[in-house]
Amino acid sequence: SQQGEEDPQALSIQEGENATMNCSYKTSINNLQWYRQNSGRGLVHLILIRSNEREKHSGRLRVTLDTSKKSSSLLITASRAADTASYFCATRSNYQLIWGAGTKLIIKP
Amino acid sequence: EAQVTQNPRYLITVTGKKLTVTCSQNMNHEYMSWYRQDPGLGLRQIYYSMNVEVTDKGDVPEGYKVSRKEKRNFPLILESPSPNQTSLYFCASSLYPLVGRVRQETQYFGPGTRLLVL
Protein backbone atom coordinates (compact mmCIF):
# COMPACT_ATOMS: atom_id res chain seq x y z
CA SER A 1 0.00 0.00 0.00
CA GLN A 2 1.21 3.50 -0.76
CA GLN A 3 2.25 5.34 2.35
CA GLY A 4 3.98 8.46 1.11
CA GLU A 5 1.92 10.94 -0.84
CA GLU A 6 3.55 13.91 -2.46
CA ASP A 7 1.85 17.21 -2.93
CA PRO A 8 1.52 18.85 -5.38
CA GLN A 9 1.51 16.26 -8.16
CA ALA A 10 3.04 18.81 -10.51
CA LEU A 11 4.74 22.16 -10.02
CA SER A 12 5.94 24.63 -12.63
CA ILE A 13 8.01 27.65 -11.59
CA GLN A 14 10.42 30.17 -13.05
CA GLU A 15 14.15 29.62 -12.83
CA GLY A 16 15.51 31.26 -9.71
CA GLU A 17 12.35 30.79 -7.66
CA ASN A 18 12.08 28.41 -4.74
CA ALA A 19 10.21 25.13 -5.08
CA THR A 20 8.46 23.44 -2.19
CA MET A 21 6.95 20.00 -2.27
CA ASN A 22 5.37 18.03 0.52
CA CYS A 23 5.10 14.41 1.54
CA SER A 24 2.62 12.86 3.93
CA TYR A 25 2.74 9.38 5.35
CA LYS A 26 0.52 7.19 7.46
CA THR A 27 2.45 5.06 9.92
CA SER A 28 5.41 5.58 12.22
CA ILE A 29 8.73 5.68 10.42
CA ASN A 30 12.42 5.19 11.08
CA ASN A 31 13.48 7.77 8.54
CA LEU A 32 12.34 9.57 5.42
CA GLN A 33 14.33 9.99 2.23
CA TRP A 34 13.94 12.19 -0.81
CA TYR A 35 15.00 11.08 -4.27
CA ARG A 36 15.07 12.70 -7.70
CA GLN A 37 14.27 11.00 -10.98
CA ASN A 38 15.11 12.43 -14.34
CA SER A 39 12.71 11.31 -17.03
CA GLY A 40 12.53 7.49 -17.13
CA ARG A 41 15.85 7.00 -15.37
CA GLY A 42 16.80 5.48 -12.05
CA LEU A 43 16.23 7.47 -8.89
CA VAL A 44 19.06 9.34 -7.24
CA HIS A 45 19.25 9.86 -3.50
CA LEU A 46 19.07 13.47 -2.32
CA ILE A 47 18.75 13.50 1.45
CA LEU A 48 17.75 11.39 4.44
CA ILE A 49 16.19 12.71 7.61
CA ARG A 50 15.79 10.52 10.68
CA SER A 51 12.63 10.40 12.72
CA ASN A 52 14.30 12.28 15.60
CA GLU A 53 15.46 15.13 13.35
CA ARG A 54 13.34 18.14 12.44
CA GLU A 55 15.36 19.84 9.74
CA LYS A 56 18.26 19.03 7.48
CA HIS A 57 20.19 20.95 4.83
CA SER A 58 22.24 19.86 1.86
CA GLY A 59 23.38 22.56 -0.54
CA ARG A 60 20.25 24.19 -1.98
CA LEU A 61 18.02 21.56 -0.39
CA ARG A 62 16.22 21.94 2.90
CA VAL A 63 14.11 19.15 4.33
CA THR A 64 11.82 19.35 7.31
CA LEU A 65 10.06 16.56 9.14
CA ASP A 66 7.06 16.88 11.40
CA THR A 67 6.35 13.48 12.92
CA SER A 68 3.28 14.77 14.78
CA LYS A 69 1.68 15.65 11.45
CA LYS A 70 3.34 12.75 9.63
CA SER A 71 4.63 15.06 6.95
CA SER A 72 7.84 16.29 5.38
CA SER A 73 8.69 19.08 2.99
CA LEU A 74 11.49 19.50 0.49
CA LEU A 75 12.53 23.02 -0.40
CA ILE A 76 14.80 23.69 -3.37
CA THR A 77 16.11 27.23 -3.31
CA ALA A 78 17.20 29.28 -6.33
CA SER A 79 15.92 26.66 -8.77
CA ARG A 80 17.78 25.87 -11.97
CA ALA A 81 16.71 24.27 -15.23
CA ALA A 82 18.65 21.16 -14.22
CA ASP A 83 16.30 20.72 -11.24
CA THR A 84 13.53 19.73 -13.66
CA ALA A 85 12.70 16.19 -12.58
CA SER A 86 10.28 14.16 -10.50
CA TYR A 87 10.84 14.08 -6.76
CA PHE A 88 9.84 11.20 -4.53
CA CYS A 89 9.73 10.68 -0.83
CA ALA A 90 10.33 7.26 0.67
CA THR A 91 9.58 6.22 4.19
CA ARG A 92 11.16 3.28 5.90
CA SER A 93 9.15 1.23 8.29
CA ASN A 94 11.23 -1.73 9.48
CA TYR A 95 12.63 -3.46 6.38
CA GLN A 96 10.42 -1.92 3.74
CA LEU A 97 10.74 1.30 1.84
CA ILE A 98 7.42 2.76 0.76
CA TRP A 99 7.28 5.37 -1.94
CA GLY A 100 4.95 8.15 -2.88
CA ALA A 101 3.69 8.87 -6.38
CA GLY A 102 6.03 11.83 -6.79
CA THR A 103 5.95 15.53 -7.62
CA LYS A 104 6.85 16.50 -11.15
CA LEU A 105 8.83 19.75 -11.06
CA ILE A 106 9.33 21.87 -14.17
CA ILE A 107 11.67 24.84 -14.09
CA LYS A 108 10.94 27.34 -16.81
CA PRO A 109 13.90 29.36 -18.15
CA GLU B 1 32.67 2.36 -11.09
CA ALA B 2 30.09 1.60 -8.42
CA GLN B 3 26.85 0.74 -10.12
CA VAL B 4 23.73 -1.34 -10.40
CA THR B 5 23.19 -2.91 -13.80
CA GLN B 6 20.03 -4.35 -15.24
CA ASN B 7 19.47 -6.39 -18.36
CA PRO B 8 17.75 -6.14 -20.66
CA ARG B 9 16.93 -2.45 -20.77
CA TYR B 10 13.98 -2.98 -23.07
CA LEU B 11 11.91 -6.10 -23.60
CA ILE B 12 8.82 -6.89 -25.62
CA THR B 13 7.32 -10.30 -25.01
CA VAL B 14 4.05 -12.19 -25.26
CA THR B 15 1.72 -13.40 -22.57
CA GLY B 16 2.90 -16.57 -20.87
CA LYS B 17 6.48 -16.60 -22.09
CA LYS B 18 8.78 -16.87 -19.10
CA LEU B 19 11.38 -14.16 -18.75
CA THR B 20 14.14 -13.10 -16.39
CA VAL B 21 15.45 -9.61 -15.76
CA THR B 22 18.91 -9.65 -14.27
CA CYS B 23 20.25 -7.24 -11.67
CA SER B 24 23.81 -7.01 -10.48
CA GLN B 25 25.61 -4.64 -8.11
CA ASN B 26 29.34 -4.29 -7.52
CA MET B 27 29.21 -2.46 -4.19
CA ASN B 28 28.98 -5.48 -1.88
CA HIS B 29 25.56 -4.32 -0.77
CA GLU B 30 23.49 -6.53 1.47
CA TYR B 31 20.04 -5.16 0.68
CA MET B 32 18.56 -5.43 -2.80
CA SER B 33 15.06 -4.87 -4.05
CA TRP B 34 12.88 -4.75 -7.13
CA TYR B 35 10.34 -2.06 -7.90
CA ARG B 36 7.86 -1.41 -10.61
CA GLN B 37 6.89 2.08 -11.60
CA ASP B 38 3.59 2.90 -13.22
CA PRO B 39 2.19 6.34 -14.08
CA GLY B 40 0.49 7.95 -11.11
CA LEU B 41 1.44 5.13 -8.76
CA GLY B 42 5.04 5.91 -7.98
CA LEU B 43 7.34 3.05 -7.07
CA ARG B 44 5.93 -0.14 -5.67
CA GLN B 45 8.20 -2.70 -4.12
CA ILE B 46 7.90 -6.19 -5.55
CA TYR B 47 10.43 -8.16 -3.52
CA TYR B 48 13.42 -7.36 -1.40
CA SER B 49 16.37 -9.30 -0.06
CA MET B 50 18.25 -8.69 3.14
CA ASN B 51 21.15 -10.95 2.18
CA VAL B 52 22.01 -14.15 0.36
CA GLU B 53 19.14 -16.65 0.51
CA VAL B 54 16.97 -14.16 2.42
CA THR B 55 14.10 -12.70 0.43
CA ASP B 56 10.71 -11.32 1.31
CA LYS B 57 7.61 -10.00 -0.40
CA GLY B 58 7.02 -6.33 -0.93
CA ASP B 59 3.71 -4.70 -1.75
CA VAL B 60 3.05 -6.31 -5.14
CA PRO B 61 4.72 -9.74 -5.32
CA GLU B 62 2.00 -11.58 -7.25
CA GLY B 63 3.25 -12.96 -10.54
CA TYR B 64 6.93 -12.49 -9.70
CA LYS B 65 9.71 -14.61 -8.26
CA VAL B 66 13.21 -13.71 -7.13
CA SER B 67 16.30 -15.50 -5.93
CA ARG B 68 19.46 -14.39 -4.15
CA LYS B 69 22.04 -17.11 -4.55
CA GLU B 70 24.94 -14.67 -4.65
CA LYS B 71 25.32 -11.34 -2.92
CA ARG B 72 25.77 -9.36 -6.11
CA ASN B 73 22.87 -10.76 -8.16
CA PHE B 74 19.14 -10.49 -7.65
CA PRO B 75 17.21 -11.66 -10.73
CA LEU B 76 13.51 -11.00 -11.20
CA ILE B 77 11.57 -13.83 -12.79
CA LEU B 78 8.18 -13.62 -14.46
CA GLU B 79 7.07 -17.22 -14.89
CA SER B 80 3.98 -16.40 -16.97
CA PRO B 81 3.91 -12.70 -17.84
CA SER B 82 0.59 -10.97 -18.37
CA PRO B 83 -0.21 -7.57 -19.91
CA ASN B 84 -0.78 -6.01 -16.47
CA GLN B 85 2.91 -6.56 -15.80
CA THR B 86 3.79 -4.08 -18.51
CA SER B 87 5.77 -1.53 -16.58
CA LEU B 88 9.12 0.12 -15.89
CA TYR B 89 11.16 -2.02 -13.49
CA PHE B 90 13.99 -0.85 -11.26
CA CYS B 91 16.46 -2.81 -9.23
CA ALA B 92 18.06 -1.06 -6.26
CA SER B 93 20.60 -1.88 -3.60
CA SER B 94 21.91 -0.43 -0.36
CA LEU B 95 24.49 -1.38 2.23
CA TYR B 96 22.24 -2.09 5.17
CA PRO B 97 18.58 -1.34 5.55
CA LEU B 98 18.28 -0.67 9.22
CA VAL B 99 21.14 1.45 10.41
CA GLY B 100 19.65 4.89 9.99
CA ARG B 101 22.78 6.37 8.51
CA VAL B 102 22.78 7.99 5.07
CA ARG B 103 25.65 5.96 3.64
CA GLN B 104 24.12 2.68 4.66
CA GLU B 105 20.55 3.45 3.72
CA THR B 106 20.96 5.24 0.41
CA GLN B 107 19.35 3.23 -2.34
CA TYR B 108 21.34 2.96 -5.57
CA PHE B 109 19.15 2.37 -8.58
CA GLY B 110 19.75 0.60 -11.83
CA PRO B 111 18.85 2.30 -15.14
CA GLY B 112 15.50 0.53 -15.42
CA THR B 113 13.97 -2.11 -17.68
CA ARG B 114 10.98 -1.24 -19.81
CA LEU B 115 8.80 -4.31 -20.26
CA LEU B 116 5.90 -4.61 -22.65
CA VAL B 117 3.79 -7.76 -22.45
CA LEU B 118 1.49 -8.27 -25.44
Image (spheres, rainbow, N blue to C red):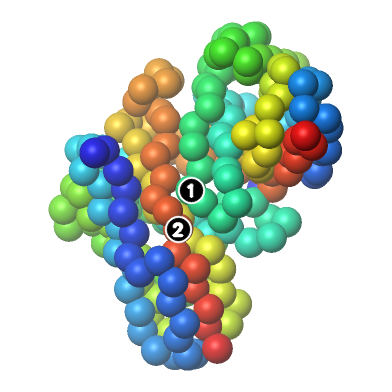
Image location of residue A15, percent across then percent down:
77, 27
Q: Chain of mark 1?
A: A
Of A59 and A20, nearer the camera is A59
Residue with the mark numbered 1: A42
Identity of the residue drawn at 53% across and 23% down: A47
Q: Identify the image quadrant of residue A28.
A: top right
Whether B118 is drawn above or below A66: the answer is below
Q: Name the quadrant of the C terminus of chain A.
A: top right
Residue with the mark numbered 2: B112
**Could you give the CA–CA distance between mark 1 and mark 2, rounded to whole angstroms?**
6 Å
The reply to whether residue B27 is visible in this rendering is: yes
Residue furthest to the left in view is: B70
Whether A81 is drawn above or below A49: the answer is below
Identity of the residue drawn at 72% across and 18% down: A78
Task: Give the amino acid type for the residue marked by disc 2 in the picture.
Answer: Gly
Of A83 and A66, nearer the camera is A83
Identity of the residue drawn at 30% across and 32% down: B95
